[in-house]
Image (tube, grey):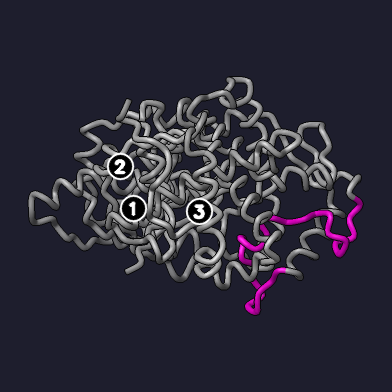
């Protein structure tokens, strides 16, 4: 059975510096929490995806081998190992720490608010609505509502629309904090008119409650689950609202202007290159745009955009994208909306650069939890480089390895990893008492963070060894 799971992580879940040490290899440490996350938050290969002791030992061997291979190749590098990916990941985690400590950790959920939400959590509301710009028409509608004019009369006789928009809205399927709060934080009656509601997309909304379907909870266990669900939803909505306020203050008075000619050329070329058969673009396909692609015919030294008086050339924006893939606000984008969505992605890129400046100023790049977590990704990258170098020496391409990795591991890597274990055995200490207490599942779970340049919470599981024997190192509990 495969279970796909989305972890909605508004702030990064950093490793605790108080976490129990499971393995020490020189100056590297694998904690109990590291082991669990590496085993459970990504998909493990078939040879160790179970929860039995043999598979647990293969997992432990794999994580130790990853560290050893990283340490070994690091000694042969002429300078400190870094890549745009690692730099971008570091800055993403800096932003997450900044936002967590500035916003998310300060959220307080009031018990009265939970009570109001519990009244609505199982309701599916049937509504009619008007969505409009914040202008004289919305002011007119607001005044008519104050005069107790019927909602249908407003729509048909004043706004002159033939068919009033309708939809069904449930507690967990609305992601705009203003709309969610307007409907689900109060006790509503049939024919209530809610509004004006000012939405995230700068619209003014008026909502007419037609009725609802209610599915009341039955058991005490259901009730406890509902309380937890409500807490999480209120936290999510408050997080979005407070984040928007924080960014609005951060970017207040700052402006982005795009140079028309290069931007239009870029939008046209990239849509043509990446469009699907349905004449749409999948945002994931254009996340890592190479603006210096010769087919785009753009001068890398010419400006693409201006940000508050500073010009960013094509090449400078491209350098930013190399460490910060573009994040689009929609997953599937139609041709007519693609230029605007591309602008939003560039604007969010510049916004994150402003957050980086704040995070560096507050020394989040020196935060011990960030340093430890980044070391995990850096060691994974170094280990991959070591394996690639080893395979090249055996005349084995990465494509061949991906096609037949189990046989290549059994015929080549197992023996090599065992020799590396013996080489570094005197530096390895393992807490077997702690290891024996760790419980794993045999469910495939892939955890990721939505809406960020780098979505994964941990590196991919290291496919290095199928060996379960641990005949190296010493027991951390023994003198």
The residue carrying mark 2 is: 435
Q: Which quadrant would the N terminus be assigned to in this image?
A: bottom left
Secondary structure state at the residue bearing disc 3: loop
Q: Residues within 10 Å of mark 2 (few under 14, many from 20)?
A: some
Residue in view at x 34 percent, y 43 percent: 181
Q: Which stretch appears magenta?
A: 274-299
3D distance between C-alphas at marks 2 and 1: 9 Å
3D distance between C-alphas at marks 1 and 3: 14 Å
Foreground disc of the pair 3, 2: 2
Residue in view at x 84 percent, y 46 percent: 315
Q: Residues within 10 Å of mark 1 (few under 14, many from 20)?
A: many
Q: Which quadrant would the C terminus be assigned to in this image?
A: top left
Q: Position of residue 443 (x, y in %)?
A: 32, 61
3D distance between C-alphas at marks 3 and 2: 19 Å
The residue carrying mark 1 is: 56
The label shown at residue 462 is 3
Q: Quadrant of residue 155?
A: bottom left
Q: Is residue 240 covered in magenta? A: no
Secondary structure state at the residue bearing disc 1: helix
Q: Residues within 10 Å of mark 3 (few under 14, many from 20)?
A: many
């Amino acid at each position: 059975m495969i279970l796909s799971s989305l972890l909605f992580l508004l702030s990064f879940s950093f490793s605790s510096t108080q976490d129990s040490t499971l393995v020490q290899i020189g100056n590297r440490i694998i904690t109990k929490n590291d082991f669990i996350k590496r085993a459970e938050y990504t998909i493990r290969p078939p040879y160790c995806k179970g929860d039995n002791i043999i598979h647990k030992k293969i997992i432990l061997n794999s994580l130790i081998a990853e560290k050893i291979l990283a340490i070994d190749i690091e000694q042969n590098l002429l300078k400190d190992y870094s890549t745009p990916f690692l730099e971008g990941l570091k800055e993403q985690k800096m932003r997450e720490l900044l936002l967590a400590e500035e916003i998310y950790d300060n959220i307080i959920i009031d018990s009265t608010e939970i009570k109001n939400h519990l009244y609505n959590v199982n309701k599916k509301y049937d509504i009619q609505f008007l969505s409009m710009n914040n202008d004289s028409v919305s002011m007119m509608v607001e005044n008519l509502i104050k005069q107790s004019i019927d909602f249908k009369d407003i729509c048909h006789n004043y706004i002159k629309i033939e068919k009033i928009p309708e939809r069904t809205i449930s507690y967990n399927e609305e992601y705009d904090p203003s709309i969610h709060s307007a409907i689900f934080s109060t006790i509503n009656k049939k024919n209530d008119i809610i509004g004006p509601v000012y939405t995230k997309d700068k619209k003014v909304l008026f909502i007419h409650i037609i009725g609802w379907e209610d599915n009341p909870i039955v058991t005490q266990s259901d009730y406890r689950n509902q309380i937890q669900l409500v807490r999480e939803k209120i936290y999510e909505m408050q997080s979005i609202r407070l984040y928007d306020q924080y960014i609005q203050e951060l970017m207040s008075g700052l402006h982005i202007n795009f140079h028309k000619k290069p931007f239009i050329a870029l939008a046209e070329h990239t849509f043509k290159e990446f469009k699907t058969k349905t004449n749409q673009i999948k945002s994931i396909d254009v996340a890592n745009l190479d603006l210096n692609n010769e087919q785009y015919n753009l001068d890398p030294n010419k400006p693409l955009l201006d940000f508050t008086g500073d010009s960013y050339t094509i090449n400078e924006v491209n350098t930013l994208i190399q460490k910060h893939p573009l994040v689009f606000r929609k997953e599937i984008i139609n041709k007519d909306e693609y230029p605007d969505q591309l602008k939003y992605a560039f604007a969010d890129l510049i916004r994150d650069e402003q957050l980086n400046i704040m995070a560096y100023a507050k020394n989040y790049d020196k935060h011990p939890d960030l340093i430890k977590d980044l070391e995990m990704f850096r060691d994974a990258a170094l280990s991959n480089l070591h394996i690639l170098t080893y395979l090249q020496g055996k005349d084995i391409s990465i494509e061949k390895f991906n096609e037949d990795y189990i046989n290549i591991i059994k015929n080549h890597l197992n023996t090599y990893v065992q020799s590396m274990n013996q080489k570094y055995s005197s530096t390895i200490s393992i807490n077997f008492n702690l290891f024996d207490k760790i419980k794993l599942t045999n469910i495939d779970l892939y955890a990721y963070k939505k809406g960020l340049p780098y979505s994964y919470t941990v590196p991919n599981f290291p496919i290095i060894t199928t060996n379960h024997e641990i005949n190296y190192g010493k027991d951390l509990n023994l003198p």
